[in-house]
């Protein structure tokens, strides 16, 4: 995968072109402090502070709104629930009166105002995503099991809990064959818009344009692709791919209008190689939908027409994937673009199949799960393993045994008191 192919799939790059054919979206540039927070680092580093892992805490908020009540923002491993020091750190820090005094809870008041204003303009609920990914792997933390967010605190919790977001920050660009990391200081948007400016109409991007492929005045070296004549010193990236590096690349948050009526069986992933549509797959390969094997006969020509009339003439890439949703009235809506290969899931195909030379020369292959036993579990992200592991010696096993011992001690104490 080449860096140029990856950068073209950023939502802030393709959304202005395809605004009429996709979900209403508002895009906000993210400051470095918030990115440090998402990466698990101190948002406002103190050189004198000890270097220790930070707990999973939400930012302090000015609105006082909490994510998905009554869910707590910190979900520790079960053993730590019985650790008094850890419990006090976790739960005491949620006292609103201590917000200004707790150094572990950073505040982003301007960003909070921008997020909340954009969500309000989108109808009160939105799906968040970064340049490439949505926090779909963190929905287990939501009360309703979806990525639906209604305020800044909910957005922050899903982004902070998501491995998909961590991948966007740390590994997306460095996974490209031609990526070189620049040595320098990050250039960010000068400021985040205030509430009145945070949600411009028609999905405008609130930014200084940093990192845009569409703006010829922008230095694209920030994306990581360096020319031989570049003034910035560069070196082959040897950093740990699991670590976010503050190298000058601009990240954005896209807030997309939430539609509760969207059905997963109506969503499909389309694979394009050499500007030719070579395959279509059911987007959710982990479920069998009885109506889908018959409905695909009607859906296929709709998707082919949408590709030929809308996508292919306007998306300047040779190889890529795009996701669509087909409505009951026959309208096709664009959901997202993803690069070819790399971390993009081939779903009901394999990349080896999709790269066969003869593919695309014959009739388009449209794959759906044809029967209940043909689903492909494991392709979708879900609940962390630690939350499901109940075996001997697991976190839950230790927690339950300690809780049982504590309960027995309390009952014994009550029995002694009553006998006196």
Image (tube, rainbow, N blue to C red):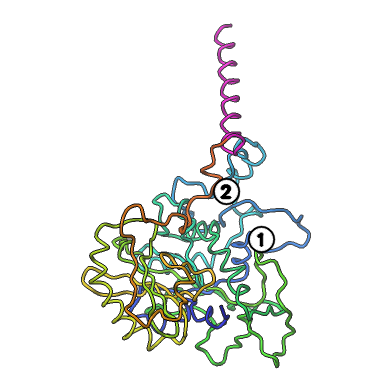
Start and end of the magenta stretch? 392-420
Q: Residue at x 76, y 55 (%)?
A: 50
Question: Which callout, 2 or 1, points at the residue further toward the start of the chain?
Answer: 1
Q: Secondary structure at mark 2?
A: helix
In this rendering, the answer to whether 344 lies above or below 156 is: below
In this rendering, the answer to whether 303 lies above or below 40 is: below
255 relative to 47 in the view: left or right = left
Query: Label 1, on which residue?
Result: 41
The image shows residue 245 at horizontal and vertical percentages of 67, 70
The image shows residue 328 at horizontal and vertical percentages of 22, 68
Q: Residue at x 40, y 56 (%)?
A: 146
Q: Residue at x 56, y 68 (%)?
A: 168
Residue reaching furthest to the left: 329
User: CA separation, marks 2 and 1?
Assistant: 24 Å
Per the picture, the main secondary structure of the magenta-coloured stretch is: helix
Query: Label 2, on which residue?
Result: 97
In the depicted view, which residue is nearer to us: 135 or 253? 135
Magenta run includes residue 404? yes
Residue reaching furthest to the top: 420
Mark 2 packing: few (<14 Cα in 10 Å), some, or many (20+)?
few
Q: Secondary structure at mark 1?
A: loop
Mark 1 packing: few (<14 Cα in 10 Å), some, or many (20+)?
some
In the depicted view, which residue is nearer to us: 180 or 195? 180
Query: Mark 2 or mark 1: which is in front?
Result: 1
Magenta run includes residue 115? no
Q: Quadrant of residue 170?
A: bottom right
In the depicted view, which residue is nearer to us: 413 or 11? 11
Find residue 381 and name its label: none
Residue reaching furthest to the right: 48
């Amino acid at each position: 995968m080449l860096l140029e192919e990856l950068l073209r799939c950023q939502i802030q790059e393709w959304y202005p072109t395809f605004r009429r054919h996709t979900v209403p979206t508002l895009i906000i540039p993210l400051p470095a402090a918030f990115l440090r927070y998402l990466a698990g680092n101190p948002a406002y580093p103190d050189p004198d502070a000890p270097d220790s892992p930070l707990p999973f805490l939400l930012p302090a908020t000015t609105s006082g709104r909490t994510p998905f009540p009554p869910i707590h923002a910190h979900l520790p491993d079960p053993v730590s629930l019985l650790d008094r020091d850890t419990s006090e750190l976790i739960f005491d820090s949620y006292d609103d009166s201590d917000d200004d005094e707790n150094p572990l809870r950073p505040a982003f008041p301007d960003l909070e105002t921008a997020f909340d204003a954009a969500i309000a303009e989108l109808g009160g609920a939105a799906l968040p995503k970064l340049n490439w990914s949505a926090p779909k792997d963190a929905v287990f933390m939501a009360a309703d099991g979806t990525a639906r967010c209604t305020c800044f605190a909910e957005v922050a919790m899903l982004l902070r809990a998501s491995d998909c977001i961590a991948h966007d920050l740390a590994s997306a660009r460095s996974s490209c064959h031609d990526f070189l990391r620049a040595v320098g200081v990050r250039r960010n948007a000068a400021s985040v818009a205030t509430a009145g400016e945070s949600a411009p109409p028609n999905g405008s991007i609130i930014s200084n344009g940093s990192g845009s492929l569409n703006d010829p005045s922008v230095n694209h070296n920030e994306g990581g692709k360096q020319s031989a004549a570049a003034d910035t010193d560069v070196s082959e990236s040897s950093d740990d791919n699991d670590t976010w590096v503050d190298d000058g690349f601009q990240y954005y948050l896209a807030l997309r209008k939430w539609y509760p009526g969207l059905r997963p069986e109506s969503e499909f992933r389309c694979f394009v190689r050499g500007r030719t549509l070579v395959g279509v797959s059911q987007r959710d390969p982990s479920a069998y939908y009885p109506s889908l094997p018959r409905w695909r006969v009607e859906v296929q020509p709709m998707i082919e027409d949408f590709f030929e009339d809308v996508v292919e003439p306007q998306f300047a890439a040779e190889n890529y994937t795009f996701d669509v949703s087909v409505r009951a009235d026959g309208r096709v809506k664009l959901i997202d673009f993803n690069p070819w290969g790399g971390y993009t899931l081939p779903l009901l195909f394999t990349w080896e199949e999709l790269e066969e030379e003869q593919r695309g020369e014959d009739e388009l292959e449209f794959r759906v799960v044809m029967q209940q036993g043909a689903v492909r579990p494991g392709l979708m992200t879900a609940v962390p393993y630690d939350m499901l592991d109940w075996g001997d010696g697991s976190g839950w096993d230790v927690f339950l045994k300690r809780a049982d011992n504590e309960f027995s001690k309390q009952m014994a104490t009550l029995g002694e008191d009553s006998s006196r």
